[in-house]
Image (cartoon, rainbow, N blue to C red):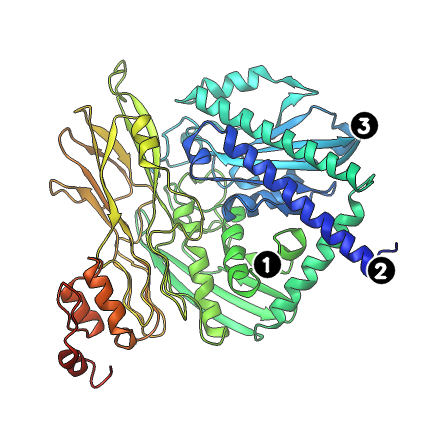
């Protein structure tokens, strides 16, 4: 067979699919072996395979855009530090450098060279979020990276199968949860080993001595498919802006999207300068979510690899909040980074016929809680994370998804897991009525969460990632905003900043997540859908009348005459 033969093309496609299954099994191995609940339960991880030029060929389906797309460029930095000729079987390399492939210190990248009959044939990489890296913990209060935790440059974790014990000891002695942290690092090593074995097995099955031809096939065809997708977007310049709550002051994001035949350039020039606190999004992380936003709309079916990512270019001013320079603090980088798909959608809405989905809650709210922090106090000592999520924006022809982590895609950590590992107890976790932005298609409903300590002791909670308190998700094409977020104590105190707050004994923390924006005129929405949601307790009678022009009882009975009058004759 020659490469141009139809049968050869089918053969290449079969191998491509097998390669994707290899990295998916790699990711599943990480899910099964991870110690930390953020990786094990929420799936905050990624896995991928790379050729010897450091180009990503395939990624696992399991994982988040922030991990996958930052890791896409991370492997090249390992090759720069450790030449391929010096790599040996049993070597494993790691780093948590935020600027060279992770975005913040909590994410570690692990890279393992794969060998076939003593020859280096590929590189397997994985990453996941660790429960702790020391420093101030998961807060945005730090004023530089030096306060945020232990920083590991590109180093060997294993040298020809021998663990670098001094490095592992150094990490373990600088974190609050050494067992979980060491367990997650070794889980990353284990999942890469799985990927190496499956890749070598696949190569033997297809009688491959190298994956170079397969790599070229994947990258050439993926790039071609992405260019074809870009050509369907009208050439032009499109501008959008967004305001976020920020930390010390509001964050203003500006984006200019230039579509020119075979490429799209996203330019964040003019956006806010880097914050003095840890909400800055390193360029690799800003690239990751910006490009993800583009692919969601123009090429969601195109596999993610170096070929498909190439025609999409992200530019930003050095020193801005989407391109901070060392040693800017970056722990809560996703509070900005995970909002970037929405501003990309703001540009695409002008270019795509029929528009694109409304804004979403965006960044997940990470409930990072701890107790027993005083020196010498071991009573009630714990350190845990939970994930809270808001609503997704309405789509041009469908309602938004309720309480869904978009764009990150992480899962919620079951409350039973958090309660089993800490003295916290969840008294309430349910959909928040009237939180969805009204529209012909409503936004997604958010959730409300109430938590207290069953030990009768105070605990602290970081509000680092709590945003959209002042700037809710906007609707599109006549749709209304989702509800803003809110958090504080059930006892009455309202928290307004991203600082660390204390929940006193006997009181509860209440977090009300933001809702997704609506799409289209709310008075054009089907009145029976509104009535059904009133009956379900998701929309109040008052909101049905004011927002949708539907007069309805709490039992869902519609007053047709009253509704028609409010809607000006519309049914």
Return the disc, 2 or 1, that comes first in the chain's sequence.
Answer: 2
Q: Locate residue 168 relative to residue 82 in the image: left or right.
A: left
> Residue at horizontal 30%, vertical 70%?
439
Badge 1 density bin: few <14, some 14–19, many ≥20, Cα 10 Å: some
The circle on residue 5 is 2
The circle on residue 465 is none
Which residue appears farthest toward the right when viewing the image? Answer: 1
- The CA distance from mark 3 to mark 2 is 32 Å
Q: Tell me residue 26's x, y (percent).
A: 60, 36
- Identify the residue position indicated by label 1 in the image: 313
Q: How many marks?
A: 3
Q: Locate residue 19 relative to residue 358 in the image: left or right.
A: right
- Evaluate whether residue 48 shows in this view: no
- The CA distance from mark 2 to mark 1 is 33 Å
Return the disc, 1 or 3, that comes first in the chain's sequence.
Answer: 3
Q: Quadrant of residue 528?
A: bottom left
Determine whether 474 is above or below 87 in the image. Answer: below
Determine whether 157 is above or below 218 in the image. Answer: above
Q: Secondary structure at mark 1?
A: strand
Q: Nearer the viewer, mark 1 or mark 3?
A: 3
> Residue at horizontal 45%, vertical 19%?
179
Quadrant of the rendering where the C terminus is positioned = bottom left
> Residue at horizontal 13%, vertical 30%?
506
Badge 3 density bin: few <14, some 14–19, many ≥20, Cα 10 Å: few
- The CA distance from mark 1 to mark 3 is 38 Å
Q: Secondary structure at mark 3?
A: loop
Residues 355 and 266: in front is: 355
- Identify the residue position indicated by label 3 in the image: 118
């Amino acid at each position: 067979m020659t490469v141009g033969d139809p049968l050869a093309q089918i053969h290449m496609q079969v191998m491509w699919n097998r390669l994707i299954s290899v990295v998916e099994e790699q990711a599943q191995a990480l899910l099964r072996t991870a110690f930390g609940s953020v990786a094990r339960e929420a799936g905050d991880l990624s896995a991928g395979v790379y050729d010897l030029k450091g180009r990503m060929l395939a990624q696992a389906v399991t994982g988040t855009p922030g991990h996958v797309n930052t890791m896409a460029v991370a492997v090249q930095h390992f090759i720069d530090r450790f030449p391929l000729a010096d790599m040996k079987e049993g070597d494993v390399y790691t780093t948590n450098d935020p600027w060279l492939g992770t975005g913040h210190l909590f994410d570690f990248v692990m890279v393992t060279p794969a060998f076939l009959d003593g020859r280096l044939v590929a590189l397997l990489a994985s990453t996941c979020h660790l429960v702790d890296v020391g420093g101030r913990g998961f807060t945005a209060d730090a004023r530089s990276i030096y306060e945020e935790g232990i920083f590991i440059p590109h180093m060997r974790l294993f040298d020809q199968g021998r663990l670098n014990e001094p490095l592992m000891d150094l990490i373990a002695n600088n974190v609050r949860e050494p067992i979980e942290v060491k367990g997650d690092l070794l889980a990353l090593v284990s999942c890469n080993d799985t990927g190496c074995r499956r890749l070598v097995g696949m190569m033997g099955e297809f009688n491959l001595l190298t994956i170079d031809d397969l790599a070229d096939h994947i990258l050439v065809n993926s790039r071609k498919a992405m260019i074809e997708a870009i050509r369907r977007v009208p050439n032009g310049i499109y501008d959008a802006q967004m305001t976020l709550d920020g930390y010390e002051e509001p964050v203003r994001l500006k984006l200019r999207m230039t579509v020119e035949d075979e490429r799209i350039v996203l330019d964040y020039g003019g956006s806010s300068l880097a914050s003095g606190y840890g909400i800055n999004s390193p360029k690799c992380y800003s690239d990751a979510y910006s490009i993800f936003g583009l692919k969601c709309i123009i090429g969601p079916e195109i596999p993610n690899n170096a070929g498909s990512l190439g025609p999409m270019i992200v530019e930003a001013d050095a020193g801005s909040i989407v391109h901070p320079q060392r040693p800017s603090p970056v722990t809560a980088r996703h509070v900005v980074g995970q909002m970037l798909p929405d501003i990309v959608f703001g540009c695409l809405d002008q270019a795509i016929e029929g528009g694109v989905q409304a804004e979403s809650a965006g960044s997940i709210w990470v409930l990072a809680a701890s107790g027993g922090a005083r020196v010498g106090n071991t009573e009630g000592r714990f350190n845990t994370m939970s994930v809270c999520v808001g609503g997704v924006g309405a789509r041009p022809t469908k309602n938004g998804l309720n309480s869904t982590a978009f764009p990150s895609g992480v899962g919620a950590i079951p409350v039973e897991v958090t309660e089993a590992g800490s003295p916290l107890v969840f008294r309430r976790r349910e959909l928040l009525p009237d939180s969805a932005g009204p529209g012909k298609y409503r936004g997604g409903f958010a959730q409300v969460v109430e938590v207290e300590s069953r030990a009768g002791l105070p605990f602290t909670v970081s509000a680092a990632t709590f945003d959209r308190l002042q700037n809710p998700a906007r609707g599109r094409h006549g749709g209304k905003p989702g509800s803003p977020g809110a958090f504080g104590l059930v006892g009455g105190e309202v928290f307004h900043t991203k600082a660390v707050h204390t929940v006193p004994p006997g009181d509860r923390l209440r977090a009300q997540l933001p809702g997704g924006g609506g799409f289209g005129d709310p008075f054009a929405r089907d009145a029976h859908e509104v009535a059904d949601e009133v009956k379900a307790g998701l929309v109040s009678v008052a909101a049905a009348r004011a927002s949708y022009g539907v007069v309805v009882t709490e039992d869902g009975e519609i007053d047709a005459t009253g509704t028609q009058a409010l809607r000006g004759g519309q049914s």
